[in-house]
Amino acid sequence: MAAKKTGFIVGAVAGAGVAAAALAGAGLRLPPAVGQTAQHQPLAVTKTSMSPIFAPPPGAPLSFADIFDRVSPAVVSINVKSKVDARAMTKRIPGFPFDILPQTPQGQDGPPAQREALSAGSGFFVSRDGYVVTNNHVVENAEDITVIMKDERELKAKVVGRDEGTDLAVLKVQTGGDFPFVDFENSGKPRVGDWVMTVGNPFGLGGTATAGIVSAYGRDIGEQFVDYIQIDAPINRGNSGGPTFDVYGRVIGVNTAIFSPSGGSVGIGFAIPSEIADRVVKQLISGGKVTRGYMGAVIQTLTPETADSIGLSGRKGALVAELTPGGPADKAGVHQGDVVVGINGKPVANNTDLTRQVAATKTGDVMRLDVVRDGKTKTIEVRAGVRPSEKTLAANDNSGDDDAPAAPDNAPAARPNVLGMTLAPLDEAARRRYTIGKDVRGVVIDAVQASSDAGQKGLRRGDVISGVKLADATVVAASPAQVAGAVDAARKAGRTSVLLQIVRDGRPLFLPVKIEK
């Protein structure tokens, strides 16, 4: 598995993969296991779902065998064949200062352009007619997919749709049949401390069951659209994408990642909540893709220090750092530096919260944004657009326009020390020295004291200060003197920090810097 972020492991790699599962539509009660006695029959069945349901045990269950017998026929192993760049398949031997490339077949001048890779993961049926849910990263480069059932039947499958945002994908087996499947639980969920069971394909060992408890909800591990469930049931390489069941045999999550310094299970696993997976899977089955609302803005969390620097102490929200020209927010009149504190009557806690609320909006719907601008609150109506793919968004940049008018050369000017930074005019010499585009306006940071708050926050030579945001206005940084004056005004107003608008590599961001006495 490839590292998703430090310590977090997700994905399928050659020899050890991961797959996911999800559920859409009405459920089907799974057939009883061979030789099953009356005491193994479900004790209760709801009117809305025919998934196996068991009376909750008083305390720790004596056994998970009944649950496993009922749900395991719906859980599958997934084998994937894909092509990978041979140059990426290098090996590094400890103590050797070079990479070892794969052996080149005789008669070739260099390593083959591509090699076949095999990976394995987990998944589960979500419908009687053969829809299977798995993780996107398991199948995004797949050329051949085989689904292996509990009874050892091997079925070929094709990708129906993938969603990068939640790392979910839906497959469809190519052989017809009446397949056992399971249901998502969306109305109720286990409490922290309640028992859960996972079934999957760790290290290629299909049909493996592990048990534990729900450790926490709302875990943020760096994904924009998912607050994960944390569980301590052991999951390893190959479990990712398999189902987590409650004690009633209902799917409450899709295993996706583990936290592990070593690569093995340390009792901290993460699952996509069923309500998110269910919604995404239904869209993938119906249309092959997921559409999300879009406002066209880069946003930052309104940290306590940032809020204090602009007179919003104690407030929560999201700060608009950048607008997509011609995007929905730009057209509606949202300004860079606005603080979004509410959407459609609901409060906004941070940038992730705003992103998820916007994404949940249907394209074309009107979003009512409550924003604070220059100390005043106003409501702006934004018509939601269609969010581009995550790859498209990642590829976008703010490269400078070579045809933009150049800033005039400035005569030698004073270089004041402000907040531990030496500021200089952004003249042609500075643009060449720091490779700053002609469309960028402001003053350049020529030096930073490492011990200052600015240095501790990561400001560096070549960063451009384009503005200073005060409680009731934004001062455009046309010269070093204007920045110094704005900071002095904030100091006299009793502020303990000031919010600087920074441009780095063509991208803007806001950063609060403490005002030193």
Image: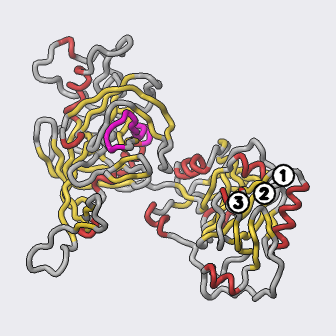
Cα–Cα gap, marks 1 and 2 = 7 Å
Q: Which residue type does callout 2 highlight?
A: Val
Which residue does the numbered mark 2 point to in the structure image? 498
Horizontal and vertical percent position of residue 490? 85, 57
Q: CA distance from mark 2 to mark 3?
A: 11 Å
Q: Earlier in the sequence, mark 2 or mark 3?
A: 3
Q: Is residue 264 above or below residue 318?
A: above
Segment tinted magenta in the rendering: 262-276
Examine the rendering and report whether any part of residue 287 can be seen. Answer: no
Q: Quadrant of the C terminus?
A: bottom right
Q: Nearer the viewer, mark 1 or mark 3?
A: 3
Disc 1 to disc 2: CB gap under 8 Å: yes
Front-most of residues 47 and 118: 118
- Residue 493 spot, x, y in % from top left: 89, 53
> Does any portion of residue 246 appear in the rendered image?
yes
- Mark 2 crowd level (few <14, some 14–19, many ≥20, 10 Å Cα): many
Q: Is residue 406 above or below residue 278?
A: below
Task: Report which residue position mark 1 lands on.
Answer: 495
Residue that label 3 marks: 454
